[in-house]
Image (tube, grey):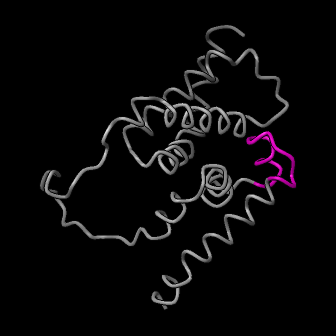
Amino acid sequence: MAQDQRREWLNDAITRWERQILHLCFAYLGDTALAEDAVQETFLKAWKNYDNFRGEAEEKTWLMRIAMNTCKDLVKSSWFRNTDRSVTPDQLPEGAVPFEERDDTVTRAVMGLPPKLREATLLRWYQGLTLEEMCRVMRLPRSTVNYRLKKAKTMLKGELEEWYDEAE
């Protein structure tokens, strides 16, 4: 593929998929700056490996797979494991707009799932992928993906049952 065509493809892919990939990376990593880095790395890897893309999967699922692997690599890195990324409220700058606290119980419950179940949950309910797309992204058989979704749903139901009752 000529450089101009490749550049045009990359610009188009970024326009179409950047926001969804950013949401996925943020949900996986829980950090805005790391998620932005992961998105850049995802598109860089896609750019470098575009000639290897055989079209067996849709472009979206191919990019989501790259993003998931990039996030996994970041989580496994020694920097990620050895860096304290927590920030206390007194360390934050004063906001220009009054802060409204949001209930993040569901997000915390999802992030507390084991990695394999969290990945399935993020792809299905945060990204809205179909079961077939999930199988391609995760490179797993349908039965395994179904099992992970059911297991995650059961764990979340148990975790959120009390919260749901309080919300009503």
Viewer-closest of 156 and 44: 156
Highlighted magenta segment, given as a residue range:
130-144
Q: Residue at coordinates 39% horizontally, 45% vertically from top-left?
A: 31
Q: Residue at x 45, y 89 (%)?
A: 166
Q: Is residue 125 depicted above or below 66 in this figure?
A: below
With 138 as the anchor, is 132 left or right in this view?
right
Residue nearest the observer in this picture, 10 or 156:
156
Residue 119 on the magenta segment: no
Q: Position of residue 117 (x, y in %)?
A: 66, 55
Count the numbered circles shown: 0
Which is more toward the observer, 15 or 101?
A: 101
Q: Quadrant of the N terminus?
A: top right
Instruction: Specify whether 73 is left or right of 166.
Output: right
Residue 90 place in picture, x, y as percent:
13, 56
Is 55 situated above or below 27?
above
Q: Quadrant of residue 103?
A: bottom left
Relative height, residue 41 to residue 58 (above, below): above
User: Which residue corresponds to the image point at 42% horizontal and 37% vertical from the top-left?
Assistant: 81
Q: Is residue 53 left or right of residue 92?
A: right
Residue furthest top in the image: 2
**Image position, residue 22 (x, y; %):** 50, 43
Percent coordinates x, y for residue 93 in the rendering:
14, 51
| Residue that appears at 81% across and 59% down | 146
Does the magenta stretch mainly form a helix, a strand or a loop? Answer: helix
Left or right: 33 in relation to 162: left
